[in-house]
Amino acid sequence: MKNIKFELTENTINWEDRILYQIKACTSFTTNSGIEINAGELGGWIEKEENLSQEGKAWVWKDSKVYGTSKVYGDAEVYGNAIVWGNAKVCGTAQICDDTKIGGNADIWGAAKVCGNSKISGNAEVWDDATIWGNAKVCGNAKVWGNSKISGNAKICGNAEIWGNAKISDYAEILEDATIRDNAEVAGDAKIFGNAAIKGNAKVAGKAIIFGDSEVWDYSEIYGCSKVFGDAKIGGDAFISSPDDTLTITPLGRYRVSLTVFKTKENSIKISYNWNIYTLEKFQSVMNDWTEEEIEVAKAVIEAAKLQLNFSSNEK
């Protein structure tokens, strides 16, 4: 006969109009977290045998509940007051703990860890070494992977993607098709949506709103009630704390792309054009092969930006 890891006991509870059965280990083994399970030891509650794999080191601990067509397999562990339901799948060496709720068609795998009062639902996917905790929510078709960390009351929804070493915390919301990657951090009440991308070592916080096709990278910092939108491209040492700290015009110049003027941490002004960052002085050489009309328009935009950013006409 095939060796079985656990069996359903006659201990039952009524949960959400479903009958859940407490499991009991039929053999001794050590979970992936290093805790030994002894034969005869009682575990958590599942609706049917298919909810927990008989193979691997996967285990559902006391007080945890797994039901519906959801499945825990591989070396994954579910413990605390965690609940896994719907068609959710938890596998690899993933750990679901505390008061976490995993539902819908969510997939959790790799060495991902989801804990606290987090909720993962919809078609959301969390994998690699990603960590979700606090009251964070990941829903829709959102994807979180790498070493990224989602905490606080952060919300990741839509088709948003979080990866690398990115950190999302507090009440930040990442929605629609936005991407947060690399070492970027988003905190406070910031909202990132549309096709916006925050990458590199950029930081966004406060009540900042970034949307459209905007991109923020390098060591840029966006704070306060700032708004970055449209086709804006902000990099280098940008420091934006107000909607008046940046101006974007598109299309412009020989390459017919956006030109963004922004304030820096040194309280100077720089220009982002065609994925490069320039001082006002160095940008003059970029226009060497432009037509007179293109140069005239660009200079007019820069002068307007100086007025908006409160810079004198001879600022370099």
Image (cartoon, helix red, strand yellow):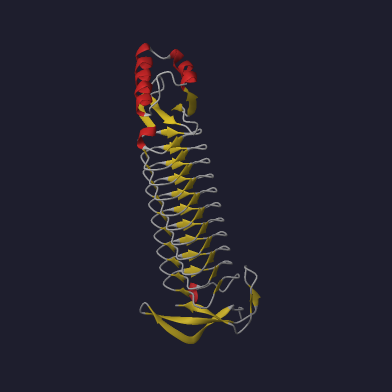
45, 137: nearer the viewer: 137
Locate residue 278, reporting x and y percent.
Answer: 49, 24
Locate residue 48, reporting x and y percent.
Answer: 46, 77
Looking at the image, can residue 238 be seen? yes
Q: Is residue 184 above or below residue 134?
A: above
Locate residue 243, reporting x and y percent.
Answer: 35, 36
Dividing the picture into quarters, in which one does residue 57 lie? bottom right
Looking at the image, can residue 251 be seen? no
151, 112: nearer the viewer: 151
Q: Is residue 77 above or below residue 142?
A: below
188, 51: nearer the viewer: 188
Q: Residue furthest bottom?
A: 10
Tally the numbered discs. Answer: 0
Locate residue 52, reporting x and y percent.
Answer: 52, 73
Residue depicted at 39% across the width and 32% down the height: 246
Residue depicted at 40% across the width and 25% down the height: 311
Quadrant in which the N terminus appears: bottom right
Residue depicted at 36% across the width and 21% down the height: 303
